[in-house]
Image: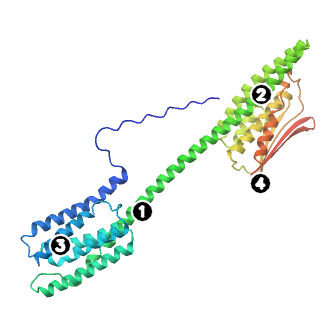
Amino acid sequence: MTSSRHPDPQPQPRPAGRAPLSGPSRERVEESLPRVFLLLVTIAGTIVQWPAGRITLPALALPLFVLTSLAALGTLPSWTRLTDRQQNAAAAAYVLLGSLLLPLAHDTTTASLFPYMACAAAGTKLTSRRTAVGIAVSGAVVAAAATALVEHLNPGTSQWPWWIALTVGLPVYIGISRRDRSEALLNARRATDEARRATASEAREAALEERGRIAREIHDVLGHSLSGIAMQLDMADALRGSDRHEEADTAVRRARALAVDSISETRRAVQALREDTLPLPQTLRQMAENNSAAFELAGDPAPLPPEAAHTVVRVAQEALTNAIKYAPGAARALRLGFADDRTTLTVSNTAATGAPRAELAGGTGMGLVGMRERVALLGGTLHAGPRGEGWTVELEIPR
C-alpha cells in the first residue's frame, strides 16, 4: 500500500527591503509612540523655554537638565541586556535627577514633567514592583525636600508647595499597570501559541494513529487471504504431482475465490474505516440491512474508543461473511448490547437451507483467529461455535 504526499511548498523569497514587524514587535512600537512623543516634547519645550524662563541656580540646573534628558532618552530602548542591578541604578538615577531638576527649572513648565515620567518609567521597566515603588517614593521625598530647600534659599522664586511635589511618585502605578498589561498579553499570546502547537501535535498523532490502524486492517485482511491462497496453490501443486488433476483444479478455483473474496474484504475494510465515524449502532444497523440480517439494540448506547468500535464492526463483518459463505439461505441476526462495564455483540445464524459453493467454503479459517488476537489486545473475549443447528459468534469488550 503506497501513499502519496504533496511536496512541501517551497519558501517564497522575501522581497528586498526591511523585514515587516511581527505582531508583538509592532504592538510594542505602537505602545511606545506616545511615551516617545511626550518625552521629545518635554525636552524640546524645556530647551525653548530655558532662555526666557527664570532658572534657579543655572550653573547647577543646566547640567542636571542635560543629564536628565540623557537618562530619559536611555529609557527608550529595551533594557533586556542590563542586569537587574543596572536597571535599578538607571531608574533611580533618572528619578533622582528629575526630582532635583523640578524646583530649579519650575518656570519652564515642561521640565516638571521629568520626575513624573521617570517614576512611570521605573514602574514600566523594573521587574520588581517593590523596587519600583521604593524608587518612586524616594524620588517623591527628594522632590519635596528639594522644593522646600530651594524655596527656603530663594524665597522670591515661584514654587509649588512641597507637599504637591510628593505626587511625582504616583505615576509609578501607571507604569506597573502597563507592565502588568504587557505581561498578561504576552502570557496570553504564549498560551495561544502553545495551544496551537498542542493542537497541531494532537492532529499529527491522530493522523499517525489512523495510518497505523489502516495498515493493521489491510494487513489482517490481505495477510489472511494471501495465506489461504498460498495454501491452496501449494495443495494444487502437490495434487498435480500425484496426478490428481480434478482435485488440483478445485484447489486452484478455491484460490481464485479467495483472491476475489480478499478484494471484497479489503473494500469492506476501507468502508468500515470510513463508517466508524458514525455512531456504532447506526453502522451495525446499516450493515445488517445490507446483509438482510435482523438487528437488535439492547441498553443505552455509550461511546467507545475508535479502536474498540472498529473492532466490533470488523467482527460483525467477519461473522456475517462466514454465515453467507458457509450457511447460505440461513437467517442471520445481530445483537448489540451496552452494559455498565462492557459492550457485547452477538452474531448468529440458523441452519443452512442450501448447499455451500465449493469454491467459497474452503476458507483458511484465519479470519476469526485474527479477530481473537485483536480483541485480546483490547482486553476482551471472542467465542465462536455451534448453537443448536446454527452458529453463533459472541464478542465482549470491557469499557
Eye-nearest disc, 3 or 4 = 3
Which residue position holds label 4? Answer: 341
Q: Which quadrant does the N terminus fall into?
A: top right
Q: Earlier along the polypeptide chain: callout 1 or callout 3?
A: 3
In the image, what residue type sits under mark 3?
Leu
Mark 4, Cα crowd under 10 Å, few <14 / some 14-19 / many 20+, is few
Which residue position holds label 3? Answer: 64
Q: Please give the name of the residue rendered at 69% of the width and 49% of the height, measured from the top-left corner.
A: 303
Which residue position holds label 2? Answer: 225
Q: Position of residue 196 (x, y in %)?
A: 50, 50
Q: Please give the name of the residue rendered at 15% of the width and 64% of the height, measured from the top-left corner.
A: 44
In the image, what residue type sits under mark 4?
Asp
Comparing 268 with 120, the one in front is: 120
Comparing 261 with 23, the one in front is: 23
SS for dot 4: loop
Say which mark, if any, is on residue 184.
1
**How many numbered discs sit on the rendered protein?**
4
SS for dot 1: helix
Report the residue that reaches farthest toward the right. Answer: 388
Q: Please give the name of the residue rendered at 22% of the width and 71% of the height, measured from the top-left corner.
A: 114
Q: Earlier along the polypeptide chain: callout 1 or callout 2?
A: 1
Q: Earlier along the polypeptide chain: callout 4 or callout 1?
A: 1
